[in-house]
Image (tube, rainbow, N blue to C red):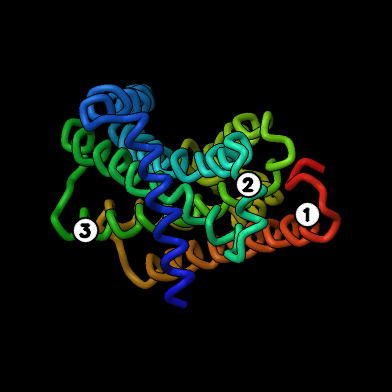
Amino acid sequence: MNRRLQVLWFAVRAGSADHSAVFTWRTWLFGWFVRMLAQVLFFTTFGSLLGPAQAHYLLIGNAVVLVALHGLFATASTTWELQNGTLPLLVASPSSPSLVLAGRSLFWLPDGVACGLGAILILGPLSGLPLSLASVALTVLLLTLVAMTTYCLGLCLGSLVLSAADLRNVVSNATLTVMMILCGAEVPRSALPGVLGLVAQGLPMTHGLLAIRQVLAGTAGMGTAVAAAQEAAVGACWLGAAIAVLAWRARRSRRDGAALFLT
């Protein structure tokens, strides 16, 4: 177990080093974060034309979308090892490639939570959204949960496109668009046809967003805890699928000697 944790820790450090090479705190805060904030502000402003309730609905929904966006970045960053030429070395090593790749992109999680929470804290008071210390604390926990579940989905998608890395951005962007439509970020899920509603039940963010809405509306209760548990269960299923696909690919490459994930 200690060996596995050590491997995971080194993978996290490697990913964090990549993130640090792209962003300094200044470029992140005044570049990336401002860009993320502008995205939520756009939807919030659009909603304000329909009334305060719609503005709050779109503000919360699109703030959580920022968290999901960062989780789905794992789809692309999972393929970085292939692009760097280090993926065959991972399979040749005694460590599990699944463990390395699972930790490789974890740096997206705090980034996404910071963007989503920042949007709520900055734009919420400006749009009249009531916030309390308790609701903010619960929101942080739920945003972290959404970050983890969408990360599991991103990891699963990344494992599927490892042999077609050119599709990584197409797949992640298409998935995010579907989630924005189906998970209740832009329109209530009650407006969806029955089949699409069932699909939404199996997607990350659906239940987590519902729980966050309840917390920020001051109506948190047992239903909120149930929604959070459902969100965790969905994420666990996607994580299991990702690990299974990665393990299968590694076993196949070790068996037939082909270049890892290229065939």
Element at label 1: helix
Give the distance between the C-alpha atoms of the residues marked 2 and 1, in whole angstroms.
11 Å
Q: Which residue is mark 2?
A: 87
The spot of residue 95 in percent (x, y) is 58, 64
Look at the picture and state if 13 lies above or below 255.
Answer: above
Give the distance between the C-alpha atoms of the residues marked 3 and 2, in whole angstroms.
39 Å
Name which of mark 1 and mark 3 comes first in the sequence: 3
Instruction: Residue at 82%, 48% (x, y): give it.
Output: 258
Name which of mark 3 and mark 2 comes first in the sequence: 2
Q: Which residue is mark 3?
A: 137
Tell whether 45 sits left or right of 97.
Answer: left
The spot of residue 58 in percent (x, y) is 38, 35
Classify the position of the C terminus by image quarter.
top right
Tell whether 161 sits left or right of 235.
Answer: right
Element at label 2: helix
Task: Please state which of the two labelled residues, at mark 1 or mark 3, is closer to the viewer.
Answer: 1
